[in-house]
Amino acid sequence: MKALPTGTVTFVFTDIEGSTRLIQRLGSGHREVLETHTQLLRKAISEAGGIEVGERGDGFFFVFVSACDAARAAAQIQRSLAEHSWPPGGTVRVRIGMHTGEGVLGGDNYMGLEVHRAARVGTAGHGGQVILSEATATLLRDSLPTDLSLRDLGCYRLKDLPQKEQLFQLLIPGLPADFPPPRTLGFTHINLPHQLTSFVGRRRELEEVLQGLTVSRLLTLTGPGGTGKTRLSLQAAAEVAPGFPDGVFFVPLAPITDPELVVPTILSSLNLPPAKGDPFSSLREYLESRRILLVLDNFEQILSAGHQVGDWLRAAPGLKVLVTSRAPLRVYGEREYSVPPLDMPDPTQPTELAKLAESEAVTLFVDRASAARPDFALSEQNASTIAEIVTRLDGLPLAIELAASRVKLMPPQTILDRLSSRLALLTGGARDLPARQQTLRGAIAWSYELLEEPVRQLFRRLSIFVGGACLPELEAVCGPDFESGVEVLDALAVLVDHSLVKQRQLGTETHISMLETIREFANELLVESGELDQLEERHTEAFLALAESAEPNLVRKGRRRWLDRLEADVDNLRTALSRLITSGEIGSAQRMVGILWRFWQVRGYIKEGRKRAAEVLSHSGGEPAQRVSALFAAGGMAYWQGDMETMKQMYAEALELARELNDPRTLALALYNNAFPTAMHGTLEEGKLLLEEGLAVAEELGDSALIGEILWGFGTIYWFVGEHQAGEPWYDRALEALQGSDSVFVVGWAHHMRGLLRTEKGDFVGAREDLRTSMSLFAEDDDLSGIVLSLNHFAALALAEDDVERALRLAAAAAKAEEVSETGMLEVVQNRIPGLTQADARVGRERAEELLAEGRAMPLKQAVAYALETPEKVVA
């Protein structure tokens, strides 16, 4: 081996694109192909005066003293590879990266940042492409061989490198010059879901979509389910991402059917808080000054919301929208792109292996089949059969993937035989459906026919769930009268294995879901089976039961598990509640609202919760106890949004009804609830009388958690009427009563309020201890409403300790968190904390704005950690 040069050198890295798939396709023949590739590379490098440093996987590391020689070698490598006659399915495409820098030796190899920079430049390219760093391009400008030229690709961030790099492409006459954007890091604001399988084919379609995005600000990819609209949109979004400095955001719309939920869903995908006022205005205000790409996926069920997209585009000149839908939005300025099937073999031409290997549909089948069975490969024996399979499936990606997955069980010819009969059976479907959709139905129906009847029954029944379900609800809904001798879990394992359902872990639970297209097909079968009414009834019962099981746990230790379960099933809960209302089961609907309100409060769904509470209360029917439950919910959520007048009305009606019930605990709660509006709008004494009556009932019941909550109420009504310090003994009594209780909700609020009172009287050590206890309890359970007020009260503590800058940061973080929580208590609370609203005057307006901006910029977890830490002033 020649001695490695030092000083200014040019590093060259090569790598085979898709080498794993190449090996899988070629089988044992891959060794000869790789050896040929190696010979061609080493010949070109040697003739240009380069030195081989080492091998890295399927690639090489070379070094040159001259950047010009390195460019000549790279060009020759690409020419040699392009001109070589490779075996069918064995074309080798190599990406090459070049960078010039200081060659520093460490033993018998190079070391240092310049080598890493060169390697990162190499990974940015595509097969057949040569990419250069700016340093190399600068050296080549005056010495580049006359037959070569450079193209400026722009600035990109490379992995592990802090600064953006200017990249260039070496243009080689006679070889492809157009490639996708470099494979580099995007930016912070990107939420495109990671894909677990490779993106096969679609080069032409991708280029057309990318071109469409350059000439139109609203591009809608249309076509029936299964054409690959979503996957194509994600690939396009990833490739144009560098052109959107403010972000690329994927918004999944499949779970929603209410057009009013479109904007809240987008705000959530943008990681923005729910709007305090008009959500449409909040979204428009956010978008109007930014360069953003929104990818709105599955728009077809909410087409009536299409006009909103047009409004956003008019308000935000830097916005572009990429939509996937089974129908166009019919909005002014919309450009529609109908996603075609994958490129298929020409049935009129001989089935030459080399030609078939170039077919996108065949490539997809082989790729997915080899994933299911690693030894699977395209061969002379199976090529024509695979070509017929993908042709009969009309080149639809979902259909092809479903068919390919069956190679685990049967050879391609058997797949074709089964598929042929099923397609013939289903071609007589509804004529008003697109032909491709009928074919897709055939593909899914064929997968369905491969199942034994008990598994088919479960497949149909699973479609009743919106967004999937966890195993307990799945078994409760689908398990009764399931075919004897077969366990639901066994049938479910078959569906998972057949790729007809997906599973994921949700805490300690297993969550099962279907792709939306497959769910639609399964739901049609469920309707035809005559089981729909029965399944809907069970579904409603199951999720009402889930809510009832969760109810006592929403204030106890370990409540996070239950809050997370309800959040995972929020779409099922919505569906069940709507079904109760429309079927006239108002009492059960009121009961469900009465349970869910605490979940809505702590997890940021108060606006939706108040709407549902008002809806169920507008209906007559149900038992008085059920109505009281919904009135408690309506009053509680009104309180948390600072709507004290509505709170007063709801609680007053609830108390009137509760006095007629023979239920001491409900009466005690009604008395407790009414004490707040009575003290705030009437007199303190009247409020105390209500609490005293409620406390007597709670003590007779021996309910320590209820006793503690009512004692907390005494302290809090004192605070609301301005007699702050009179409340502290009541919080002490509340915590004493709660000793040994698992009611972490009340414990947290007792520490919280006592910490605020200790702040006001100057006991900062005690205040910090209390506030830390409460904040830790709230943060552990993702209790947004508790976190909001805790941040605010930590701000009050910082202000009392004369740490105004810390106070302003925390107050701003609290205000931002309140937007996410949909609560409205800050204004009520801040009016009762001396000096907090005027803190900005103590540091000057300009500095105050900086501090407030810092606080609002904090992610919620960071804000919580900042609040919990001991400030430097206190440590000192």
Image: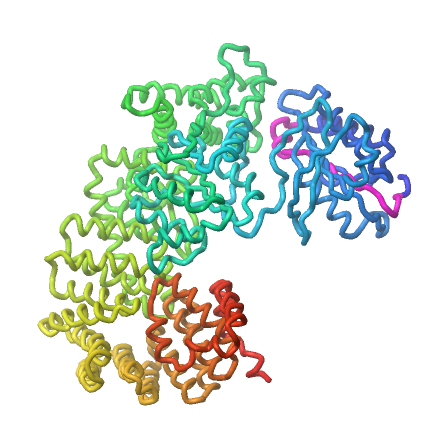
Residue at (33% x, 86% y) in the render: 724
Count every numbered label the image shows and give the total: 0
Q: Looking at the figure, which quarter contains the C terminus?
A: bottom right
User: Which segment is the magenta one?
Assistant: 4-28
Nearer to the camera, 113 or 505: 113
Residue at (15% x, 48% y) in the render: 583
The answer to if 280 sits in the magenta stretch is no
In screen coordinates, is 53 left or right of 791? right
Identify the image quadrant of residue 299. top left
Q: As displayed, is residue 719 above or below residue 36?
A: below
The answer to if 7 sits in the magenta stretch is yes
Identify the image quadrant of residue 59. top right
Residue at (48% x, 37% y) in the render: 233
In screen coordinates, is 448 left or right of 668? right
Residue 748 shows up from this direction? yes
Q: As displayed, is residue 223 above or below residue 290?
A: above
Give residue 744's position: percent from left, percent from top.
36, 74
Nearer to the camera, 129 or 370: 129
Outermost residue, right direction?
A: 3
